[in-house]
Amino acid sequence: MLIAPSLLAADFGNLQSAVRFVNTSEADYLHIDLMDGVFVPNITFGFPAIKAVSAAATKPLDVHLMTVDPVKFIPQVRDCGATIMTIHVEACTHIHRAMQSIRQAGMKVGVALNPGTPLCMIEEIVTEADLIMLMAVNPGFGGQSFITSTISKTERLKKMLKETGSKAIIGVDGGVNAHTGGLLAHAGADMLIAGSYVFNAPDPLSAIHTLKTL
Ligand code: DX5
Ligand code: ZN
């Protein structure tokens, strides 16, 4: 299982030590949530903060944009050194063109879906994506409860990827813990994004290890 701890749940007063902790862990990516207060009712990191995090990080960055018009931020996200840029299908009128632009900028392409967005929204573009990220909470905040319909959505997505020959991996973001992570692993998820379960754990390294071995 690929693991991406979400920095949103870290101590913002000491981000460098959170990044160093992730560097030493079994995590595969560092997940960074960029919110604009418009697409979602919250604001998080801006580009100067992401650049500083990136400079301290040894794991590849997966930058999750919860913004309207994410295409206009492609150069900044690239300049932050992101490996994956994940955009929401709901935020893009021209998702296909947006994905092409991310790839042309030299990044891997992630496409996220809100819990209320059906899989048919990505049917035509799954073969162009590197990552399909299912939101298991309504985006905007950490520490929310897992929406259980994400399990069957993961199974259906797995089937869709197989039928279309897509090589995209399936990520799930929100409400991930050892229990929901186990269900997701069984349903076909390839990558788990976890904020509070990792950073609020008494032993964050072993929390990552638990998810890693699901
Ligand atoms: C939510 C973010 C998530 C968040 C997950 O909008 O996209 O990445 O950090 O937090 P937990 O794991 O606490 O649900
Ligand atoms: Zn996220």
Image (cartoon, grey):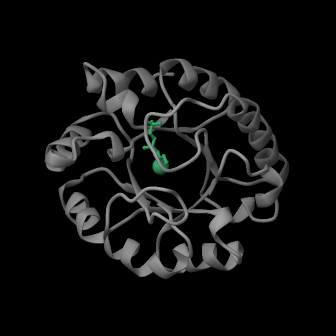
Q: How many marks?
A: 0
Q: Say whether residue 77 is left or right of residue 174.
A: left
Q: Quadrant of residue 154?
A: top right
Instruction: Relative to 55, say whether 133 is above or below.
Output: above
Give the percent coordinates (x, y) of residue 149.
73, 32
Q: Which of 66/213 is in front?
A: 66
Q: Quadrant of residue 5?
A: top left
Q: Say whether residue 56 is left or right of residue 118.
A: left
Give the percent coordinates (x, y) of residue 89.
67, 63
Residue that appears at 67% across and 32% down:
188
Give the percent coordinates (x, y) of residue 210.
41, 20
Give the percent coordinates (x, y) of residue 61.
37, 56
Q: Which of 104/6 is in front?
A: 6
Instruction: Relative to 84, say whether 95 is above or below.
Output: below
Residue that appears at 44% across and 61% down:
35
Q: Quadrant of residue 164?
A: bottom right
Residue that appears at 54% across and 25% down:
181
Instruction: Relative to 75, say whether 146 is above or below.
Output: above
Residue that appears at 69% across and 65% down:
128
Q: Say whether residue 24 is left or right of residue 171.
A: left
